[in-house]
Image: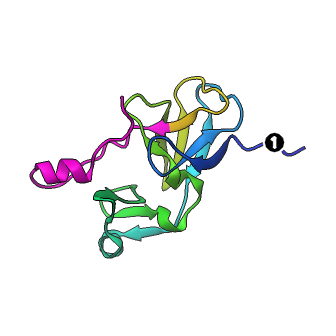
Amino acid sequence: MKTQPYHSVRTSKIHGRGVFARRPIRKGIRIIEYTGPIINEKEADKIGVTTENGHSHTMLFQIDKKRCINGNEGGDARYLNHGCDPNCETEQDGDRIFIKSIRAIKKGEELVYDYHLQVPGKITDKVKKEYACFCRN
């Protein structure tokens, strides 16, 4: 018997598309893996950061100082939004990244984790706007 996936992707009130619980999820569950090809920093720099409506956007997940996962070519985990009050966190297992529940999650709840985004250089008003938080927490 095949089990129902933990998640589905649909429009988010936070930002763009989001990932939502299809069923209740207990604390400590690996819900989804952040997938895509592993690329080096030079390849990542070529992809760079895109801008949508004046806001920076990337689907690259750093796994060490020289490599990241290119989520642009990955699965549904790339659609998880940032949340300042997260219900999930990332868990690294070698070169693999998993999204894991840090508390019980109700069916229909959006899955979010804290991106811990680090922006290089001086944090100006322009940079704050480009990397604005949409979670409203």
Q: How many marks?
A: 1
Task: Between residue 77 and residue 124, name the one nearer to us.
Answer: 124
Percent x, y of residue 69:
45, 62
Percent x, y of residue 115:
37, 43
Q: Is residue 98 above or below residue 136?
A: below
Residue carrying label 1: 3
Residue visible at 45% across and 41% down in the picture: 14
Residue visible at 12% across and 55% down in the picture: 121
Which quarter of the picture shows residue 84? top left
Percent x, y of residue 79:
51, 52
Residue visible at 61% across and 40% down in the picture: 20
Residue visible at 59% across and 32% down in the picture: 109
Q: Please give the range of residues in magenta.
A: 112-137
Percent x, y of residue 26:
64, 25
Q: Main secondary structure of the magenta part?
A: loop
Query: Which quadrant would the N terminus be assigned to in this image?
Result: top right
Task: Between residue 129 and residue 105, name the one nearer to us.
Answer: 129
Secondary element type, mark 1: loop
Left or right of 131? Residue 110 is: right
Q: Is residue 1 magenta?
A: no
Q: Residues within 10 Å of mark 1 (few under 14, many from 20)?
A: few
Which quarter of the picture shows residue 22? top right
The answer to whether residue 55 is seen in the rendering is yes
